Image (spheres, rainbow, N blue to C red):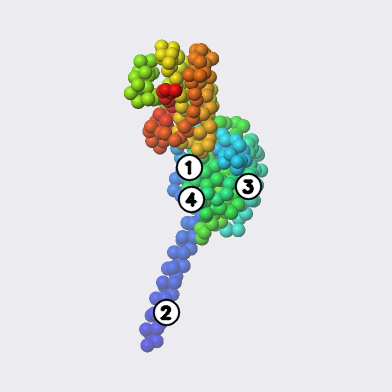
């Protein structure tokens, strides 16, 4: 009987030893970066943190909050729209007692020492609105305001700190959001977004429409999309290469003196709803102003409108699709 008990005891000790070995092995692996992840060379991590998620896009349009949140406008007072290489790394700590505010203050202090200029930094009420009830699926979202304004029931009432900085030596912007993640795997976490600006020529397969083709589109569909009216990035400034299409629109209206046009601006889905609605309206207004001032079209025959991201004609998941969605449409006005 004692031999049986002795054998059972040995097996229990062996199982316990194996369990503890596995536990310590997992603990040793817990604070390692995920495979293929690493810091950006210009931004050092906080000691004791490790990367749990890592995302990269060779060329992406990103909108970064650059001012406090205005509740009346439901948007940040200033936003910075950038295009270029996009990196996002999510870091966490094994130590659950790491202070989120201390992490934020560390970045506020060390980034200028590393050659960055702080554009904006704030916490809690400077950044967010009331809980929207939506989930905090911010990891791959290109607008950092998504984390700050759509934290949902999980992150709501948790402290959030944010900063935006630009390198003084390279075309690099860094946004860092530090927050307390709830739940068993929570504790202080921080998300570093790095955007390296660059210009990219997006090839288009369409050709400029003639006045007769515009007329045909209006007659058959009541509207026609003009893809060749181009604007400066994040602006209502009309680029010089748009002059040909604008001259064609003027030609059409001069040939048909009874024709009135609603000029509708459209955007892709990068940035929040209000931002895109405002930008599309500003761009359509710029087109109307151009036709009035450069071609003498009567203002009574034109009206501007902005549809923002509401009516895509292609998927916004690709740059080619987003390029198609950034357009101006002409709609016939019959009154």
Image location of residue 70, percent across then percent down: 61, 41
Measured in 3D between alpha carbons, the distance from the residue under mark 3 to the one under mark 1, in whole angstroms, is 21 Å
Say which of 173 and 35 sits in front: 173
Circle 1 residues within 10 Å: few <14, some 14–19, many ≥20 = some
Image location of residue 331, percent across then percent down: 42, 25
Q: Which residue is mark 1?
A: 141
For this orientation, the residue located farthest to the bottom is: 1
Q: Which residue is mark 4?
A: 135
**Where 29 sits versus 174, above or below?**
below
Measured in 3D between alpha carbons, the distance from the residue under mark 1 to the one under mark 4, in whole angstroms, is 12 Å
Image location of residue 311, percent across then percent down: 42, 34
Q: Which image quadrant: the C terminus? A: top left
**Contact? badges 2 and 1 (CB < 8 Å):** no
Q: Earlier in the sequence, mark 1 or mark 4?
A: 4
> Can you tell which mark lies on residue 9?
2
In this rendering, the label closer to the viewer, 3 or 1: 3
Q: Earlier in the sequence, mark 2 or mark 1?
A: 2
**Contact? badges 4 and 2 (CB < 8 Å):** no
Q: For numbered disc 1, what is the local secondary structure? A: loop
Q: Is residue 109 visible?
A: yes
**Where 157 sits versus 304, above or below?**
below
């Amino acid at each position: 009987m004692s031999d049986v008990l002795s054998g059972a005891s040995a097996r229990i000790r062996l199982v316990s030893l194996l369990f503890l070995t596995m536990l310590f092995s997992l603990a040793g692996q817990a604070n390692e970066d995920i495979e293929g992840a690493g810091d950006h060379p210009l931004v050092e991590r906080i000691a004791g943190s490790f990367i749990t998620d890592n995302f990269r896009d060779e060329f992406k349009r990103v909108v970064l909050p650059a001012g406090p949140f205005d509740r009346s406008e439901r948007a940040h007072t200033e936003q910075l729209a950038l295009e270029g290489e996009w990196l996002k790394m999510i870091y966490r700590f094994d130590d659950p007692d790491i202070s989120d505010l201390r992490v934020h203050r560390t970045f506020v202090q060390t980034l200028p020492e590393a050659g960055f200029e702080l554009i904006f930094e704030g916490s809690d009420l400077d950044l967010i609105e009331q809980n929207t009830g939506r989930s905090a699926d911010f990891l791959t979202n290109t607008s950092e305001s998504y984390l700050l304004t759509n934290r949902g029931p999980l992150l709501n009432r948790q402290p959030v700190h944010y900063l935006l900085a630009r390198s003084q030596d390279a075309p690099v912007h860094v946004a860092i959001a530090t927050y307390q993640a709830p739940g068993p795997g929570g504790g202080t976490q921080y998300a570093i977004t790095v955007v390296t600006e660059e210009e990219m020529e997006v090839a288009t397969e369409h050709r400029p429409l003639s006045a007769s083709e515009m007329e045909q589109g209006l007659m058959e569909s009541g509207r026609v999309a003009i893809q060749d009216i181009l604007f400066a990035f994040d602006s209502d400034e009309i680029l010089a290469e748009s002059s040909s299409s604008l001259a064609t629109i003027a030609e059409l209206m001069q040939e048909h003196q009874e024709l009135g046009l609603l000029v509708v601006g459209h955007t892709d889905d990068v940035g929040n709803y209000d931002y895109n609605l405002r930008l599309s309206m500003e761009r359509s207004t710029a087109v109307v102003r151009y036709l009035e001032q450069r071609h003498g079209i009567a203002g009574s025959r034109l009206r501007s409108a902005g549809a923002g991201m509401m009516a895509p004609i292609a998927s916004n998941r690709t740059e080619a699709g987003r390029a198609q969605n950034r357009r101006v449409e002409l709609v016939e006005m019959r009154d």
